[in-house]
Amino acid sequence: MAPPAQSQRSPSPSQPSGKSEVSDLKLQLRQLAGSRAPGVDDSKRELFKKVISYMTVGIDVSSLFGEMVMCSATSDIVLKKMCYLYVGNYAKVNPDLALLTINFLQRDCNDEDPMIRGLALRSLCSLRVANFVEYLVGPLGSGLKDSNSYVRMVAVIGVLKLYHISASTCVDADFPSILKHLMLNDSDTQVVANCLSALQEIWSAEASTSEEASREREALISKPVIYYLLNRIREFSEWAQCLVLELVTKYVPSDSSEIFDIMNLLEDRLQHANGAVVLATIKVFLHLTLSMTDVHQQVYERIKAPLLTLVSSGSPEQSYAVLSHLHLLVMRAPYIFSSDYKHFYCQYNEPSYVKRLKLEMLTAVANESNTYEIVTELCEYAANVDIPIARESIRAVGKIALQQYDVNAIVDRLLQFLEMEKDYVTAEALVLVKDLLRKYPQWSHDCIAVVGNISSKNVQEPKAKAALIWMLGEYSQDMQDAPYILESLVENWDEEHSAEVRLHLLTAVMKCFFKRPPETQNALGTALAAGIADFHQDVHDRALFYYRILQYNVSVAERVVNPPKQAVSVFADTQSSEIKDRIFDEFNSLSVVYQKPSYMFTDKEHRGPFEFSDELGNLSIGGEAADNVVSAQRVEENDKDLLLTTSEKEETRGSSNNGSAYTAPYDGSSTSVFALQTHIESAISNPTAADHSPQASLAIDDLLGLGLPAAPAPPSPQLKLNTTAALDPSTFQHKWRQLPVALSQVCLNTQ
Amino acid sequence: MISQFFVLSQRGDNIVFRDYRGDVAKGTAEIFFRKVKFWKEDGQEEAPPVFDFGYVQTTSTEVLKSYIFNEPIVVDAARLQPLGPAAIFMQGTKRMPGTAVTKSVLANEPGGRKREEIFVDIIEKISVTFSSSGYILTSEIDGTIQMKSYLTGNPEIRLALNEDLSIGRGGGSVYDYRSSSGAGAVILDDCNFHESVRLDSFDMDRTLALIPPDGEFPVMNYRMTQEFKPPFRINCLIEEAGHLKAEVSLKVRAEFPSDIVANTIVVQMPLPNYTTRVSFELEPGAVGQRTDFKEANKKLEWGLKKIVGGSEHTLRAKLTFSQESHANITKEAGPVSMTFTIPMYNVSRLQVKYLQIAKKSSSYNPFRWVRYVTQANSYVARI
């Protein structure tokens, strides 16, 4: 229908208006209703258009119901269509009025024009009024047998509509088995596809109460049905092909020759220009071959080219959707894509969401043979005008370094970054060098030499500053100026806005003090005083803690604050493998684009008729989720839990810290966390065991020259802790993850 | 399956709103609008039967046409943003002013009878990255054979491509340039085809058979990393020239035959962000060139209306800085990027050898237009 003039569209639905226009229309419709004058249909059309356009923008025109129905006694198909649309929209809220329409709709269902039969049936079934179901059964029954495929198409969906209004009426009329028959025999593939959609919905809903329905649902993915649909797949529309392919992914072939038959049959679908068809086919291939490692790998090889072609044709949005899927596959099997790394190079005019994915892929596929080239390319992006991408690129270089291979050359590159004298480059590089040193302490010499040249005044970003300070503390024995740099930082305590940086400063000064006491003494005193007076609770607490433990015993303090550290071997993954597997199960859906399994962003009732993987989810989440009414929110919480309970226990402490955003370093390996606890325990509860004396604490007071009168007494004896406390790692992990996040971070940072 | 379908105006009002299943909470559209500032202005159309109860029935425009009875109101084509890739051929768009191939697509003969004609466009978007020494780091061609048919009665069409065309580069990296056989052979990495294309004889004689649907659609998309001769060579020098000064020299050489003319060329180059002033010096006798220093993002822009094959153009720019540069100046500037359109030229050498239309009668001889165009996708030279 024609676009209405601008003025008709202008009333906003938020401000109900058009009252007078509506009553005006009512009057005009009434005048035309009985008229048989020539050209009356044209005038009616104009009025109907107005009504419909009001309706579509949300103006309530339901008061015109009677007039509209009266006017639709016509053979003009345009008028009929508009009237059907109108009636469908308002019948539900106006059941009494809707009754008026039943009569003429039923009559139209027997019209000789199939178009009118179809439209009338469609409207009849769209009334959504429970009392009318008795009027639907007859027309639907004949519609399903209609000689015209359009009418059958409409009737099939009509059955589904009926089912949702009154399931029992639909089942009692034996419609599902008629649909089944149509699905397997109709000449029109759209009728077949509609039957499939309708049956999937009906039988899934019935399956919970009826065993037969449950069997029927299973029968949809039985060999005869699947083969029948597959053999006709080329006749289906692209949409319906996707529907069939999705069904095929649920089919479990009996042997490998069947798998090959299906794949051979679908092979040419990979050459389809429609990305949805290709992705759906790929999903079938991937799922069929899951248990056949070699073939599965061949599938990856086979689908590479079609995916890359889809990525480079079509709109940026389409190509992003495909790229997300490619990204998923690359992350699952980076080695298969290692020779294709050049495809993941960023083009200067790509949107940054595409670049970001590509950078992750480049990081993933880096191996011995291509690392040099990839890192060279990434270094080009570091000078990019797009600063967020430049940052990501530097991080990517760092991740590759942390991953593996040829660290030597990469360290050089990173150090070159530090010399580029761009603030953000320096900032990112510092964070990376810090991480690198935690994994490869053997590089400290080279790194320290460069880091030592960086003026802390040029580093403003808290993360980077924290990293620099951490290095100053950690390597203060190798950096000649460390105590003095720290001292100047301490002097500017009040100007330091980031609590994170202040926390690091406290710790770094402590570490420096243990290594070079005479040079640091002053700074430590100032830092502790400033820290204790700090308004930030964590900073205050840490300063006080350091102060007390120093006062108590310097060597205990050193063992707590600066214990020998093991190099970090693996940094934590941000997503558990369970989550990744679930996203893979939901291949060819938004889950891949969001990089989240569907339960994290949908309500349970919207998860489609064939949600088998849900059961799987319940299993992995454990007993809590067995409860059916569990909300998505709740599942998500459980899932965060799940992140911490997987096999990666050794690294889990980092899971919140180790994403793309780097946070402060923490020397957490579980042993050192234990060390902290046991040290404190032994030191406090068993004073004689440690070489502790009251003089020592006095000396510290003296040494620091703090103006604190009579430091708070050491913990009172009634707080006596069990010296022989034994905690096995899993119990500890259990307790640990019950701690609120903030608390655990503070603990981690105290070293 | 679709529960609701809506098109919102930029204010968030419903232009089209359909609730197919009644299973989504009210106000979804509003939530959506708040979440995304998505907007699309559209003429209101009575929603054709694309969906029924949220299930897609058909999206083929031809089938849909038969369900729509209102006369269409033709929107002034010049006001619409062209969508398809072949739109670059159309007149009245800003993207490409008058060129040799510009041809009104809607060709009506006097007397109102629609002319029988069919357009086949081979559109290639090329991406090349040159290293600072001029060596090609990566190159790719993303091509489309786009068809627009105005033939009545939808006759069958046969489209023959190069006979030496081969698809898929067996084994090894696709970037292994040495493996590409030199003389003539066109090797596609991969391609895909429109639904209507039948490939029965494709393996034998590289012929595509299809019954084209109305309107514009891609017959075939292809991707190629085979080595090709880049149409332009870019040479860029940036040197310090005294205190707080530097000089940029940009040279562009067209390496295609002299009967081919590239148009709407734009060369861009980011300059050090402490650049305050740029003075340009065009070559003597330069016509149809413009230069600009985009202060906001510190970018040099050089536009050329056209470049004839085989010619070379140079731009010199004197930069003034607000501060001393500490680092290597080449690290602070570039890379140079370029956009262009070259009509009647394609780098892949993929060709439509012939276009055969099933004859309805001996006098039936519709117009056939086969057009080529090459465009820059990402054409970058590092410095």
Image (cartoon, rainbow, N blue to C red):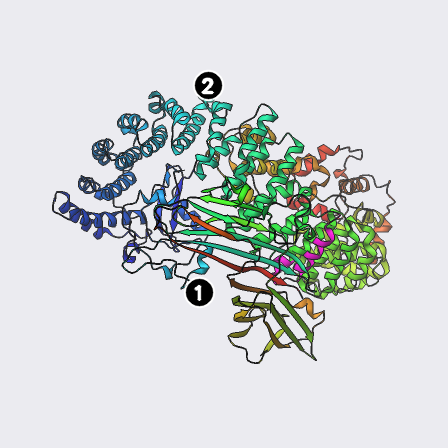
Q: Which residues are magenta?
A: A367-390
Say whether residue B45 is visible: yes
In the figure, B243 relative to A211: above or below? below
- Closer-to-camera residue (B217/B322): B217
Please name the predominant secondary structure of the magenta segment in the image: helix
Residue to which mark 1 is pinned = B94
Kind of residue at disc 2: Glu
Name of the residue lying farthest toward the front = B362
User: Which chain contains the residue that carries disc 2?
Assistant: A
**Kind of element beneath mark 2:** helix
Q: Can you see residue A461?
A: no
| Image spot of residue B207 (x, y percent) | 50, 45
Residue A717: x and y in percent read: 77, 40
Q: Quick one: label 2, few (<14), some, or many (20+) residues within 10 Å?
A: few
Q: Chain of mark 1?
A: B
In which quadrant of the rendered view does residue B41 lie? bottom left
Where residue A531 sits, quadrant-wise, is bottom right
- Judge from the rendering whether residue A277 lies leftward or rightward of residue B27; answer left or right: right
Mark 2 sits on what residue?
A211
In the picture, measured across the screen, residue A33 lies left or right of residue B377, that is: left
The CA span between labels 1 and 2 is: 64 Å
Answer above or below: position of A690 versus B131.
above
